[in-house]
Image: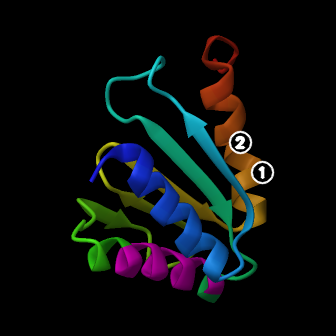
Amino acid sequence: MEADKLKHVIVGALDDLKAVNTVTLDVTGLTDVMDYLVIASGTSNRHVKSLANNVSMESKKRGVRPLGVEGDDAGEWVLVDFGDVVVHIMLPATRDLYDLERLWTNPENSS
C-alpha cells in the first residue's frame, strides 16, 4: 500500500476511537527513513493502547502489518512503525514534554 493511502487509513483508525489532536507531518524532505509521521494523543493509558491497537487492526485488514510496536505495555507513549509511516500515540503530558511536532518541523532549531 502506498504511504499516502496508509496514512489515511491510520488517521481514520485514530479518528474512529476519538484520538485527540492528530497531526500528520510530511517528512520526506527531512529524512529517508519515513515519508509521514503521525502524532496523536489519548486521554488515558488505556485509550493510548486502544488507539494503537486499532491502528494495527485497521492496517492489517488492508494487508499491511506493522514492522514493530513499542511501548504498548505501559501506554504512555506507543510507537507503531509501518516503515514509510511512523505513528506516535502519547499521553498529552508526554507529548508536551517531547514536542515531536517542533522537532520535525524545525529540525535546525531542535538542538
Q: Could you say where residue 35 lies in the image, as x and y percent from the top left?
A: 41, 34
- The answer to whether residue 53 is magenta is yes
Whether 103 is drawn above or below 50: the answer is above
Q: Could you say where residue 29 lies in the image, as x and y percent from the top left?
A: 47, 17
Q: Quadrant of residue 53?
A: bottom left
Q: Which residue is mark 1?
A: 96
Check disc 2 and report its element: helix, strand or loop: loop
Q: Name the kind of residue labelled 2 in the image.
A: Asp
Instruction: Report how far apart the C-alphas of labels 2 and 1 lie in the structure.
Output: 5 Å
Q: Quadrant of the C terminus?
A: top right
Labelled pair 2, 1 in contact (Cβ < 8 Å): yes
Front in this rendered view, residue 61 or 41 = 61
Q: What span is in magenta?
A: 47-58
Check disc 1 and report its element: helix, strand or loop: helix
Q: Name the kind of residue labelled 1 in the image.
A: Asp
Q: Quadrant of residue 65?
A: bottom left
**Is 58 on the left or on the right of 19, as rendered?**
left
- The answer to whether residue 42 is magenta is no
What residue do we see at 31% from left, 46% from top? 2
Q: Could you say where residue 67 lies in the image, as x and y percent from the top left?
A: 23, 59
